[in-house]
Image: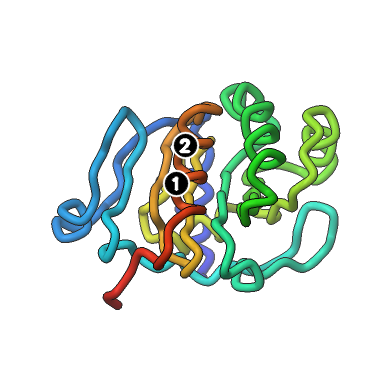
Amino acid sequence: MGQAAGAGAAALLLAACGTSTTSGSSDTEKAAASSTQEGLTEYLTGKRPMVPTLSGETIIGDQLDLADLRGNVIVLNVWGSWCAPCRAEAPDLKKVSEETRDVGVRFVGINTRDNDAAATAFERNYGITYPSFRDPDGKLLLGFNGRIPLSAVPSSVIIDRDGRIAARIIGRTTYTTLSELVTDLATEKNGGGTDE
């Protein structure tokens, strides 16, 4: 990515914790999705978009490739230690991650606009044990082509066992919403996509 594009992304990322639901989704994509509450979009079975390729370094220096988790339901949570709603939802994320691990649900974070020391302190304080990608400049979020607005921190994407986006939550999630979504996905017999 060129310096101008990087600077543009950085400028967009400087906004405070946001809950904008502007997604840039096409009319076709909107027709393939349904919203059941503020900030939550569920994609209809057979119309779920593929998750973009996502790999890189974690905040503790390990390498992580989302493709290695294919076959599990994945919750991909975008967060920053500087973000008050991220702090508010952290206990719920931790609880759901622990309760659903045995049914094939895995959690991964994308830590954005943060430094590694603050991020690791956040994880230690909230007892978060799942890995988080380092995304200090928002480049990983750009790969989601507007499905995750750059200013929407926190946000979560729930990925089915076939690597397709089944739902997204823009803004803070709750234990009840997240638990119901991943439990339903974990019991699906077939994946959610037949196109692409």
**Cβ–Cβ under 8 Å for marks 2 and 1:** yes
Q: Return the x and y of residue 53 as percentages of the image width and height.
A: 53, 71
Crowding near the residue tagged with mark 2, few <14, some 14–19, many ≥20 C-alpha atoms within 10 Å: few
Location of residue 42 with respect to 133 vertically, above or below: above
Q: Return the x and y of residue 184 as percentages of the image width and height.
A: 44, 46
Nearer to us in this view, 186 or 136: 186
Location of residue 68 with respect to 95 vertically, above or below: below
Q: Secondary structure at mark 1?
A: helix
Residue 34 falls in image quadrant: top left
Type of amino acid under label 2: Glu
Residue 80 falls in image quadrant: top right
Question: How far apart are the two marked residues, 2 and 1, measured between alpha carbons?
Answer: 6 Å
- Residue at the spot of label 1: 184
Q: Return the x and y of residue 43 as percentages of the image width and height.
A: 30, 53
Q: Secondary structure at mark 2?
A: helix
Residue for point 63% across, 67% down: 69
Residue 175 visible in this rendered orientation of the protein: yes
Residue for point 57% across, 44% down: 78
- Report the side of 141 relative to 64 (left or right): left
- In the rendered structure, find residue 81 and report the number of the disc placed on it: none
Residue 4 visible in this rendered orientation of the protein: no
Crowding near the residue tagged with mark 1, few <14, some 14–19, many ≥20 C-alpha atoms within 10 Å: few
Type of amino acid under label 1: Asp
Residue for point 32% across, 62% down: 48
- Residue at the spot of label 2: 180
Quadrant occupied by the C terminus: bottom left
